[in-house]
Image: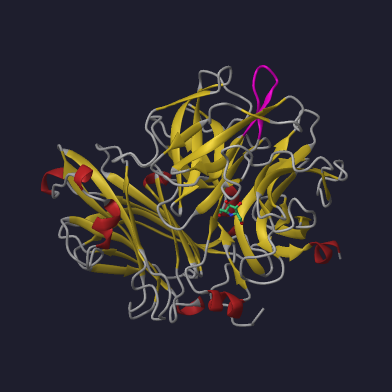
């Protein structure tokens, strides 16, 4: 890798070099966390897709192993595409993945560990029975991929879903098996939608009602709801519902992309994600691929492309209507140099520097007290697209009454470069409505980069006069958690000036009314250890 690496992250997961996309088959096995990922081991652009493999004891520091599976057989010669792991009742893990075969068709394959007593599971053996599932009948062979973690119903029959599309309808094919090897297609898909296009990387799992604990993919009772996630249109969308394993009926509350109720894990750059149940800490953890917004040429110069989001715990909100995400608390072991203050009034036009931390590599938590509702401007959020509201010219600089206020991250001293992450508060039917934006348009003086503006509403408690923001800043990524993790927005940025020690962090308010920082805590972050296996042994 070149020496100058201003954009390489310090605590986000990456292979040592080359291309990475989707997270695959994350799991906890015999005291070890495993992450597999779509990986081109040879160059920083897509191709030769194998399952990269890394292990960790804390989900922060990682050891990179050899790829677990690579293209080698007629049924996966053009790529070992995404898939999942399932821990079988014997305790052994199994990989189900999509292979792109000699005819460019997508087929579903099985691989098992060579030696399941090795907690690192360094070698995997492809089943001689592969491919287990082929695209036949009305299935399009180029739209049939990404098997989920399988689960067993009360009848002990296995179920798995696979992403696909038939004509204009995106769907999750459902397959069943008694032995994990012979699979039959169920006559109806688990769910489908004509608004979405092809579903990639579906995920299907239970969440507990009124609990911070996660639950494994098999469990289900009246205290759970099910989440169905599908990746399409460059975004990870989810819906909530009630799943009955006896009939495989999934009855939903709202469907994908419903106006005013379009739930996504993240409203920025975040795709092809996957969850797993961490039995060690009884929680469900989410990984998502955060692609680059620079060019393929930049990737070649950097020597790498693609990172993973910091692992997030994922739970059902107290009102049961959406999911809430938060960086797993292991992140705190990287925190150092705490800077904190309380009770600072921010007048219109304030730009307050948070100094004393490495602003290019930081974790920031800030909560704001909001002014009285009566003076807040009105809006009807059902008639506005939040993304559009955030994209209006000068959304971060023009005055509203309450906001825009928030952070200027990865900013240069003179503020010519800045990524503004901010809120704007409105009133509707006498209640508070919060808009959250992440504006990359001034993130870099460099040309030729993607500099989108992202936006979403935050479902805050309308009576609450507070709103909070947590931002994980790591050289070329800013992961934002608004309203205690109710709305997440992740962005990639490549500043020219605001790199390393030249990066600054500010809190600002451009609203006409004062907002008050009730509390701010910021930390410099240490570098996570990401090392190859051999070095670790010496
Ligand atoms: N990436 C994989 C596919 C999947 C897509 C190929 C989603 O299996 O559908 O690398 O990013």
Furthest toward the left, the residue is 375
The quadrant in which the C terminus is found is: bottom right
Q: State the residue at coordinates (66%, 33%).
A: 150
Q: Is residue 328 visible?
A: no
Q: State the residue at coordinates (49%, 70%).
A: 360
How far from the left and from the top, in percent, is residue 283?
Answer: 59, 37
Q: Is residue 131 left or right of residue 511?
A: right
How far from the left and from the top, in percent, is residue 144?
Answer: 59, 45
Furthest toward the front, the residue is 137
How far from the left and from the top, in percent, is residue 202?
Answer: 55, 42
Q: How many marks?
A: 0
Q: Is residue 158 magenta?
A: yes
Compared to residue 430, the image places residue 226 above or below, namely above
Q: Is residue 511 left or right of residue 107?
A: left
Colour mode of the rendering: secondary structure
Compared to residue 502, the image places residue 457 above or below, namely above
Quadrant of residue 186 within the rendered picture:
top right
The quadrant in which the N terminus is found is: bottom right
Q: Is residue 440 magenta?
A: no
Compared to residue 263, the image places residue 400 above or below, namely below
Q: State the residue at coordinates (19%, 57%).
A: 514
* Residue interval drawn in magenta: 150-160
* Viewer-nearest residue: 122 or 328: 122
Q: State the residue at coordinates (43%, 36%).
A: 239
Q: Is residue 88 left or right of residue 14?
A: right
How far from the left and from the top, in percent, is residue 94?
Answer: 76, 39
* Viewer-nearest residue: 431 or 491: 491
Q: Is residue 461 visible?
A: yes
């Amino acid at each position: 890798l070149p020496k100058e690496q201003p954009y390489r992250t310090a605590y986000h997961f990456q292979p040592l070099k080359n291309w990475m996309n989707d997270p695959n088959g994350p799991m906890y096995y015999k005291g070890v966390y495993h992450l597999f990922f779509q990986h081109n081991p040879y160059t920083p652009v897509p191709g030769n897709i194998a399952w990269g493999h890394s292990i960790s004891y804390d989900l922060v520091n990682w050891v990179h192993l050899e790829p677990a599976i690579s293209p080698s057989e007629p049924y996966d010669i053009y790529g070992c595409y995404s898939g999942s792991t399932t821990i079988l009742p014997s305790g052994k893990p199994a990989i189900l993945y999509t292979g792109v075969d000699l005819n460019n068709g997508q087929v579903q394959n099985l691989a098992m560990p060579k030696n399941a007593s090795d907690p690192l599971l360094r070698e995997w053996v492809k089943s001689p029975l592969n491919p287990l599932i082929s695209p036949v009948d009305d299935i399009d062979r180029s739209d049939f991929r990404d098997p989920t973690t399988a689960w067993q119903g009360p009848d002990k029959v296995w179920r798995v879903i696979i992403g696909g599309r038939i004509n204009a309808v995106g769907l999750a094919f459902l397959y069943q098996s008694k032995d994990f090897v012979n699979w039959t297609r169920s006559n109806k898909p688990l769910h489908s939608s004509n608004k979405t296009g092809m579903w990639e990387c579906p995920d299907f799992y239970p969440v507990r009602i009124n609990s911070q604990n996660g639950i494994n993919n098999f469990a289900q009772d009246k205290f759970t709801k099910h989440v169905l996630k599908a990746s399409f249109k460059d975004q990870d969308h989810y819906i909530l519902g009630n799943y009955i394993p006896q009939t495989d009926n999934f009855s939903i509350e709202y469907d994908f992309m419903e106006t005013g109720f379009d739930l996504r894990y993240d409203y920025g750059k975040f795709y092809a994600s996957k969850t797993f149940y961490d039995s060690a800490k009884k929680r469900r953890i989410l990984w998502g691929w955060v692609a680059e917004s620079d060019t393929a040429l930049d990737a070649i110069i950097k020597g790498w492309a693609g990172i993973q989001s910091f692992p997030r715990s994922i739970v059902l909100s107290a009102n049961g209507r959406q999911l809430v995400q938060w960086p797993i608390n292991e992140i705190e072991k990287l925190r150092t140099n705490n800077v904190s203050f309380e009770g600072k009034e921010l007048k219109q036009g304030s730009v307050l520097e948070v100094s004393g931390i490495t602003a290019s590599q930081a974790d920031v938590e800030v909560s704001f007290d909001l002014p009285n509702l009566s003076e807040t401007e009105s809006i009807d959020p059902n008639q506005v697209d939040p993304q559009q509201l955030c994209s209006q010219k000068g959304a971060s600089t023009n005055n509203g009454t309450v906001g825009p206020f928030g952070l200027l991250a990865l900013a240069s001293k003179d503020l010519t470069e800045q990524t503004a992450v901010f809120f704007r508060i409105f009133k509707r039917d006498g209640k508070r409505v919060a808009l959250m934006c992440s504006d990359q348009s001034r993130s870099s003086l460099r040309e030729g980069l993607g500099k989108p503006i992202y936006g979403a509403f935050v479902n805050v408690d309308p009576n609450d006069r507070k709103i909070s923001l947590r931002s994980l800043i790591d050289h070329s990524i800013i992961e934002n958690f608004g309203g205690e993790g109710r709305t997440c927005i992740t962005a990639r940025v490549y500043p020219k000036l605001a790199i390393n020690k030249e990066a600054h962090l500010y809190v600002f308010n451009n609203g006409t009314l004062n907002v008050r920082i009730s509390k701010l805590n910021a930390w410099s972050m240490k570098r996570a250890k990401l090392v190859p296996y051999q070095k670790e042994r010496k």
